[in-house]
Image (spheres, rainbow, N blue to C red):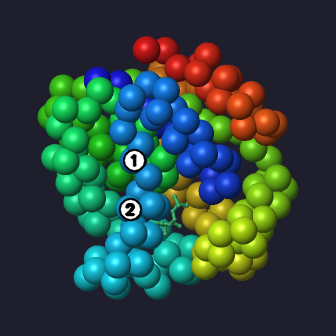
Amino acid sequence: MFNLILFGPPGAGKGTQAVKIAKKYNWIHVSTGDILRAEVSQGSPLGLQVKAVMEAGHLVSDELLIEIMKSVFLKHEEAEGFVFDGFPRTLKQAEELDKLLVGLNHPVNQVISLEVNEDELVTRLLKRAMEQGRVDDTEEVIKNRLVQYHKHTKPLQLYYQEQGIYTEVHGVGGIDDIFESLCRAIRI
Ligand code: AMP
């Protein structure tokens, strides 16, 4: 089993690339944002609980995310690999993921960061707001999501660098070119 974390701020292109990677390597794409959005649109109890937090661009609680990950692993016991997109986003989540994966005997193999400058991120997120109508892609909320990223998520870089599993890939350019760079960076 191979466990790859795609790392980077909102708008870096993690979702787009994770779909392509999952298809090529036959891994499960785990987007916690997609899982949470599905709960919100179904109006489930979990969805009702997280709706306002997501719309404000804040992070959903670590406890909820860890429960979600447990159910992902239960659902995909036979998986050949996972590509995580948007998870972990806090040190607590990273530590809990390590614990869960050690339990499964398959630690995180690699963390690849998609490097995109901040101006480009905001431009992309505003464009996505127009195209997809995501309620958390307004200018105010975008700023908040980037603040959350720098405060809670970016520090994970060091956590993974210390484990020697962190790599960076340039995330600006054509989707297929970036995909090729990612595939070259993946060390199966
Ligand atoms: P995303 O699509 O990954 O940008 O996620 C959209 C929103 O879902 C985020 O702004 C958070 O409110 C919530 N979310 C997704 N993944 C996580 C996570 N790992 N930890 C906390 N909140 C999350």
In the rendered view, tell whether residue 83 sits above or below residue 58. Answer: above
Q: Is residue 121 visible?
A: yes
Of the residues shown, which amino acid type is indicated by label 1? Val
Res 57 quadrant in image: bottom right
Please give left or right for residue 169 compared with residue 62 in the image: right
Q: Quadrant of the C terminus?
A: top left
Mark 1 and mark 2 residues within 8 Å of each other at the beta carbon: yes
Percent coordinates x, y for residue 158 in the rendering: 53, 36
How packed mark 1 is, by other alpha carbons closer than 10 Å (few <14, some 14-19, many 20 or more), is many
Please give left or right for residue 169 compared with residue 51 in the image: right
In the rendered view, tell whether residue 11 sits above or below residue 1. Answer: below
Q: Is residue 161 visible?
A: no
Please give left or right for residue 29 compared with residue 75 in the image: right
Percent coordinates x, y for residue 107 in the rendering: 29, 28
Image point (75%, 72%), residue name: 130
Q: Which mark is residue 30?
A: 1
Res 174 quadrant in image: top right
Of the residues shown, which amino acid type is indicated by label 2? Ile
Tag 1's secondary structure?
strand
Q: Which residue is mark 2?
A: 35
* Beta carbon at label 2 within 8 Å of ligand 1: yes
